[in-house]
Amino acid sequence: MVVDKGDRTVHFGAIEKKHGQPAAYWLKLLSELESTKYQDQIDFLREGHGFSQTHANALVMYSRGSTTSRRFSEPDAYFQKLTPQQAKTAREIFATIQKKYPKLVLVTAWNKPMLKLGDAYVFGLSVSKNHILLAPFGTDIVRQVEALTQGLTVNKKTIQVPLDWRINARLLSALIEARLKELK
């Protein structure tokens, strides 16, 4: 049986080993809590029983019926949840990159579309209500392409573009080239 990487139950073995009780014990305690607020349940496990955030979140979310942290099984599912303008721009960004770099594979990771080369992440993006964040993986890549980012908001590791961004293939290529050079 293949275990889904987003499967929250993968944490249960470590929880049981560290805290000395089966996951069912902790799930029962959560069901008996007076408060059903997420933060109260997290605090109960973290402050009252020494749980890490990851283990507490796995139990609390599982108890709420969320058995997986994966919201999107593939990039198309991510694009479908976007507005037409958001999806159009996001798809164009990836199409522009993949046209020049066909060996990059579009995948879903951390519930976002990402481009990979083998096991290495090269580029991703995140869409919000008012903008898209371009996210090249790697160190110092955003600073390396700063000359190409005129008029855009540049953060430490991301570049913010408008939802109706006119694709700048030169900028995208520079981001990918810098990351590929870093991977060599």
Image (spheres, rainbow, N blue to C red):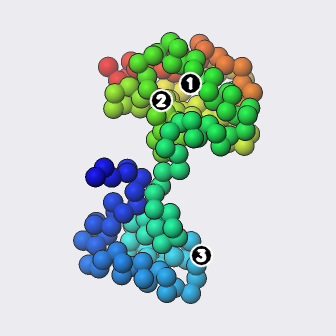
Q: Give the Cα distance between marks 2 and 3.
A: 36 Å
Check residue 37 in the rendering and tell me which mark sits there, or answer none: 3
Q: Do labels 2 and 1 touch, CB within 8 Å? A: yes
Q: Give SS at disc 2.
A: strand
- Classify residue 172 by image quadrant: top right
Q: Give the Cα distance between marks 2 and 1.
A: 8 Å
Query: Which residue is at 52% across, 14% downward?
Result: 99
Q: Is residue 184 visible?
A: yes
Q: Nearer the viewer, mark 1 or mark 3?
A: 1
Query: Which residue is at 59% across, 75% downward?
Result: 37
- Classify residue 11 by image quadrant: bottom left
Q: Which residue is mark 1?
A: 94
Task: Tell me which amino acid carries mark 2.
Answer: Leu
Task: Tell me which amino acid carries mark 1.
Answer: Phe
Q: Nearer the viewer, residue 125 or 160?
A: 125
Q: Give the Cα distance between marks 1 and 3.
A: 39 Å
Q: Do labels 2 and 3 touch, CB within 8 Å? A: no
Q: Nearer the viewer, residue 90 or 139?
A: 90
Q: Nearer the viewer, mark 2 or mark 3?
A: 2
Task: Please state the horizontal and vertical placement of residue 18, each as a whole percent of the image.
Answer: 27, 72
> N-terminal of the two: label 2 or label 3?
3
